[in-house]
Image (cartoon, rainbow, N blue to C red):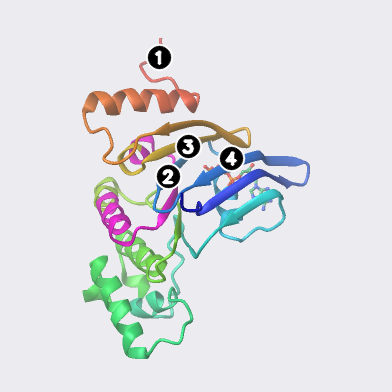
Amino acid sequence: MASPVIEVRGLTKRFGDRTVLSGLDLEIGRGEFVALLGRSGSGKSTLLRVLAGLDGEIEGTAEVDGTVSVAFQQPRLLPWRKVWRNVVLGLRREGRSQARNRAIVERALDEVRLTAHADDWPLTLSGGEAQRLSLARALVREPDLLLLDEPFGALDALTRIAMHRLVEDLWRKHGPAVLLVTHDVDEALLLAGRILVLDEGRIVAEHVLGHPRPRTPTDHAGLRTRVLADLGVTEGAPA
Ligand SMILES: Nc1ncnc2c1ncn2[C@@H]1O[C@H](COP(=O)(O)OP(=O)(O)OP(=O)(O)O)[C@@H](O)[C@H]1O
């Protein structure tokens, strides 16, 4: 079997006296699409930061085998660089010709349907466009692992639906492993092949859906109820 992209063993992360991650184990295979759910403050973003190499003060091991890209809820674009130049920032520094780099950037903009905005300033983009640009920048380096921290959280419902389709397309085309942090159970059920629930600093539940995922409304509703129960939420009208 190919080595996993993410291999985490006994990961503990403390902030002062507070233990946020506590002996967490996690393995994610190449090309897998995994969603991570958990209550607010359960440590999802902390885990992503550790995996992105942004926080090295840990106990245990957290190994990522390959290149990593991250996209956050706020797209974090550089406003003083035009749209296409923001994509260039995502490229790995390799000895490629300028013409080759330009072709890669053009293809990336085309994939997220931003070709017409290539020469615009990021501040003129809508929320959805800015998030698409952030995805293009994350994917131009063909990462082995794409970490998504609530990338659709700030978008309106219609834009979100369009983004779900786009992310699924891009995932199929580029094939990175994806770890998606989200609060939205339906989003997780729609996109991920495996759902993990984080609580008390470790993974407390796992649902393997595979691809293609269950599509019937009954399957979806059943899984939704189970995942919500893992999150300590009971559906239905108050008694
Ligand atoms: N740099 C830091 N210093 C101190 N405490 C921190 C730091 N970063 C995170 N924490 C704490 O760690 C806990 C987990 O935070 P984290 O952002 O990982 O949670 P989360 O599950 O992503 O939450 P949310 O769903 O609300 O975004 C929180 O109590 C937070 O206050």
User: Which residue in the structure is indicated by mark 3?
Assistant: 196
Which dot marks residue 170? none
Say which label, 1 or 3, has the lower sequence index.
Answer: 3
Mark 2 burial class by Cα count in 10 Å: few <14, some 14-19, many 20+? many
Look at 25% across and 67% down and name the residue there: 111
Identify which amino acid the numbered label 1 is placed on. Pro
For label 1, the SS is: loop
Comparing 2 with 150, the one in front is: 2
Residue 210 x, y percent position in the rendering: 34, 38
Front position among marks 4 and 2: 2
Q: Distance of mark 2 from mark 3, alpha carbons?
A: 7 Å
Identify which amino acid the numbered label 3 is placed on. Leu
Identify which amino acid the numbered label 4 is placed on. Gly
Say which label, 2 or 3, has the lower sequence index.
Answer: 2
The boundaries of the magenta stretch are 163-188
Q: Is residue 92 left or right of residue 12?
A: left
User: Which residue in the structure is indicated by mark 4?
Assistant: 41
For label 3, the SS is: strand
SS majority, magenta? helix
Say which label, 4 or 2, has the lower sequence index.
Answer: 2
Look at 55% across and 49% down and name the residue there: 45
Identify which amino acid the numbered label 2 is placed on. Val
Say which label, 4 or 3, has the lower sequence index.
Answer: 4
Marks 2,3: beta carbons within 8 A: yes
Q: Distance of mark 1 from mark 2, alpha carbons?
A: 32 Å
Q: Distance of mark 1 from mark 3, alpha carbons?
A: 27 Å
User: Which residue in the structure is indicated by mark 1?
Assistant: 238
Comparing 173 with 239, the one in front is: 173
Mark 3 burial class by Cα count in 10 Å: few <14, some 14-19, many 20+? many
Marks 4,3: beta carbons within 8 A: no
